[in-house]
Image (cartoon, helix red, strand yellow):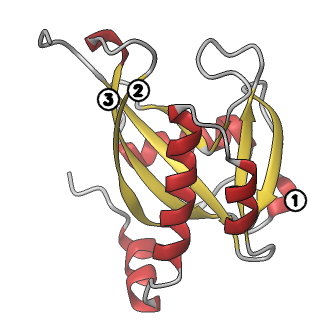
């Protein structure tokens, strides 16, 4: 493969402590990539922007709410379409919490939203396309990590964030 540029991106898995559920969003039918597929908040990092700044901007743009970042769930690498340098994206996936789940307002990027338990996510996310398999793995990891997070670590991350630079 030729050496080229790639995009930086974020994923924000949103947990509602009040509802004890995760948010899934259905990509709008008008989207050029993966229309109608369930996902979490996702987006690209803009030039001059850090991962956390991009996360908060994307959540505001897609849902009109603010979130608390609980932890980093992991990293991701995929191609948005054909495996070419122009379609390559690397990203950081965060677990976030929203204080008022009823305040969400969907943007035109999504046609629907559902709050689901991990079991309900598994029942909904049965398609075999790469995007659906990815979000299913992400929700499973979010549940496993969330259940093990020590309160002191959550407090530290909330106070200090994740950006080191």
Q: Secondary structure at mark 1?
A: helix
Q: Secondary structure at mark 3?
A: loop
Quadrant hosting residue 8: top left
Position of 20 with respect to 81 (left or right) is right
Mark closest to the chain's N terminus, 1 or 2: 2
Residue at which label 2 appears: 46
Q: Residue at x 51, y 62 (%)?
A: 95
Q: Residues within 10 Å of mark 1 (few under 14, many from 20)?
A: few
Q: What is the CA distance from the residue labelled 3 to the residue labelled 2?
A: 6 Å
Q: Is residue 99 left or right of residue 10?
A: right
Query: Are circles 3 and 1 on residues that touch, CB within 8 Å?
Result: no
- Residue 38 vs 12, above or below: the answer is above
Which residue extends farthest right? Answer: 102
The residue identified by callout 1 is 102
For marks 3 and 1, the one nearer the N-term is: 3
Dots 3 and 2: beta carbons under 8 Å? Answer: yes
Q: Is residue 96 above or below residue 147?
A: above
Q: How many marks?
A: 3
Q: Quadrant of the N terminus?
A: top left
How far is mark 1 from mark 2, CA to CA?
29 Å
The numbered dot on residue 48 is: 3
Q: Position of residue 49 (x, y in %)?
A: 36, 35
């Amino acid at each position: 493969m030729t050496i080229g540029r790639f995009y930086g991106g974020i994923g924000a898995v949103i947990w509602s402590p009040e509802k004890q559920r995760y948010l899934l969003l259905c990509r709008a039918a008008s989207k050029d990539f993966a229309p109608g597929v369930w996902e979490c908040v996702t987006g690209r990092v803009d030039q001059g922007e850090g991962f956390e700044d991009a996360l908060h901007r994307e959540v505001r743009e897609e849902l009109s709410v603010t979130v608390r970042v609980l932890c980093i769930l992991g990293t991701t690498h995929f191609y948005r379409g054909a495996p070419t340098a122009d379609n390559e994206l690397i990203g950081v996936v965060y677990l976030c919490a929203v204080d008022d789940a009823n305040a969400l307002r969907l943007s035109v990027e999504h046609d629907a939203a559902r709050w689901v338990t991990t079991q309900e996510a598994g029942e909904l996310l049965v398609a075999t396309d790469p995007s659906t398999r990815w979000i299913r793995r992400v929700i499973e990891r979010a549940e496993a990590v969330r259940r093990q997070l020590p309160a002191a670590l959550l407090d530290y991350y909330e106070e200090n964030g994740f950006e080191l630079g």
